[in-house]
Structures are given as C-alpha cells and as structure tokens.
Amino acid sequence: MARDGVFDELDIAFSWHPGEVNSVARESTMANYQACYHFYGISSHAAMSPELGRSALDALELMNTGVQYLREHIPMDNRVHYAITNTGGTLPGVVQPYAEGLYLMRAPQLGQAKDLYERVNRIANGAAMMTDTRVEIEFVKACSNTVLNTNLLQVLQKNLEQIPAPKFSKEDFALAKAMRATQKGSASYFDELLLDVTDPEEQEKLSQNSGSDIHNVVMPFPMERQGFASSDVGDVSWVCPVAQLNIATMPAGTAMHSWQEVAVGKSGMAHKGMLYAGKVLAGAAIDVLKNPAIVERAKQEKLKRTKSQAYCAPIPKEIKPKIPQDI
C-alpha cells in the first residue's frame, strides 16, 4: 500500500498495537526481508545408484550451515531466522529431489537488511553449486524500519494520561491469572519500561498500582530505543509522520504471537483495551485538527530523522500480496 501511494496524501498517521502495557511506542522497529529458497535436484535410489542423484536436501542443509557461519560476520543487532518448510520426503533410501526453507532477515536500517538478504542469497547459490542442484529464490515480503516522531508521540502520551484507563473485572483478572500460569518465565515489557523511570518513588508507585496479572497503569514517556520486532507501519512512517500506541489487551508478560495472546483476543480485557485505544487515538486526532502546528513540527522532525531521504519501497513493483498458505 505504501509502495503504491495509498498514504501519499496523508499529513500524519496514528496507529496502535495490542500488548501488555499502556504506553506510547518509542521503539524503532527493524527492517526485514523474507524469502523462500526452493532447491531442485534429481531423485535416485540412494543405495543402488547414488551417483545419479543430486540432493536438494543436501543443498538446503549446506545453505543453513553457511548462514550459521555468516552470523559471526554480521552486526550484533542483525537477525536471521529460518524454518525448513519442506524436506523433500520421508524416505531416507531416496535422494530428495526437492527441498525448501523460509528465511527472515532483519536489521535496524533497510539498507542493512537488504545487504543481509543479498548475502544470504549468495550462500543459497553457493549451496546449489556445491551440490549440482538448482535454487530458485522467491521474494516473499519486506518492510522498512520505523521512523519515530517525538512530536506525535507526545500528543498520544497526553491523551493516554488524560483519558481514564479501563477498569478490569474480576473475570478479566481471573482469566489473566489462569493464562499467566501457562507461561512461566515470560519476559515482561512492563519491567523493561520500568527501568526508564529514574525516580525510585515513582517506580515503586507504578509497581504497586499496576495489577500483577493485567498492567492497568499508564507508563511514563519512555526512552527512545531500538526494538527487534518488525512492522509494516515502518513503511508508512517513511511516507508521513507516524506515532503508535501499545495498549494492554492481554495478561502481563504474555509473549507476542503465542497461543495465549490469541486465546484472549476476544476476551473482556481485550475488548476494553481496544476501546481505550480508540479513545486515545480519537483524542490525539482532535488535538492535531485543533492545532495544525503539530503537523508542521511532525513533518520537520520526519525530514530531520530521515535526512530528507525519500521513501524507497523494499517490495518490487511486480510483487503482489500473498497469504501464508500460498508461500
């Protein structure tokens, strides 16, 4: 959508994301590239005529090994994830003629992510050469890093603090407690944000007032930091100034993309959080409409942060959206 100009006429954009805390999002997300690597070989009887076979699975394994060695020689804040999505069969007595893996590469800046993607592509091509197989690299998706905007985030923070946070019911807390019991040891974003609070008394007050099973307090304006998740909101932020909220819709410490997060998606706590997010976003929009100077300051900040660099879509023009089962 960003590539095709859907957001070109916007002055600003506000967004929100479900989470475990009520806070403005002052983390820049990672740019990423995702691609599927399809290896094609030649099937043969692994015992009687192994010399006639060319193993696509060998190629995929060599690619995975090559990427593991690559990790030593990339920046510390880069990430490479992968899944073997097809091993070519379940019979060890047959040389596998096909195998595939899905790779996701992340970096703080889009240019870094592209460089990482190209390096992984070269490893895939090298693995195909070593095994006398063929590889097809299927581009799946990409997204840009988020350009933060303090001017707009401050507008969201003001409305977070002015609009009362939702009151959760006994049923909400009971469900949250039961869900928390299923995932012990989860990292808490609340605890991470609490470290930003330098006043010990305020830190203690936030800890006491926040529910242990649902964090129902509003966090102070956080420090700016580099995050490690990715979001296509990043692409919008290169087109127009963007600010985003995190709103508590799930139990404290719930891991993102877990079954627990999905399980509470239609619960009372999620519904209350969603309505709260809507009120905060509406209040921020009203503030901007009443004070156009906010827009101008936000636009100037975007130009400064991007060094006036124009948006360059990471998704090629010929690529159309896909759904997961088609990848």
Image: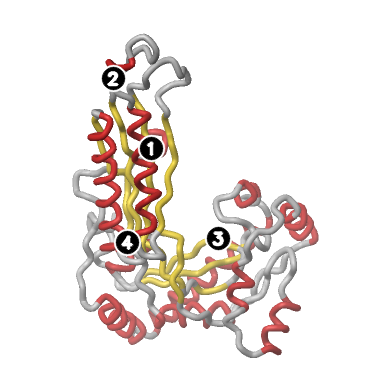
Tell me residue 134's x, y (percent): 24, 30
Please, what is the three-letter code of the amino acid marked with disc 1? Gly
Determine whether 42 is above or below 262 in the image: above
Foreground pick, 171 / 213: 213
Earlier residue among tags 2 and 3: 3
Please state if 252 lies on the left or on the right of 279 as rendered.
Answer: right
**Which numbered tag is attached to residue 42?**
2
Mark 4–mark 1 Cα distance, whole angstroms, equals 23 Å
Which residue matches tag 1? 101
Please state if 108 lies on the left or on the right of 217 as rendered.
Answer: left
Q: Are marks 4 and 3 in contact (CB under 8 Å)?
A: no
In percent of the image, x 60 and y 84: which residue is there?
197
Tell me the SS state at disc 3: strand
**Which numbered tag is attached to residue 226?**
none
Please state if 244 lies on the left or on the right of 259 as rendered.
Answer: left
Which residue matches tag 3? 18
Which residue matches tag 4? 144
Tell me the SS state at disc 1: strand
Q: Are marks 2 and 3 in contact (CB under 8 Å)?
A: no
Mark 2–mark 1 Cα distance, whole angstroms, equals 18 Å
| Residue 98, image quadrant | top left
Tell me the SS state at disc 2: loop
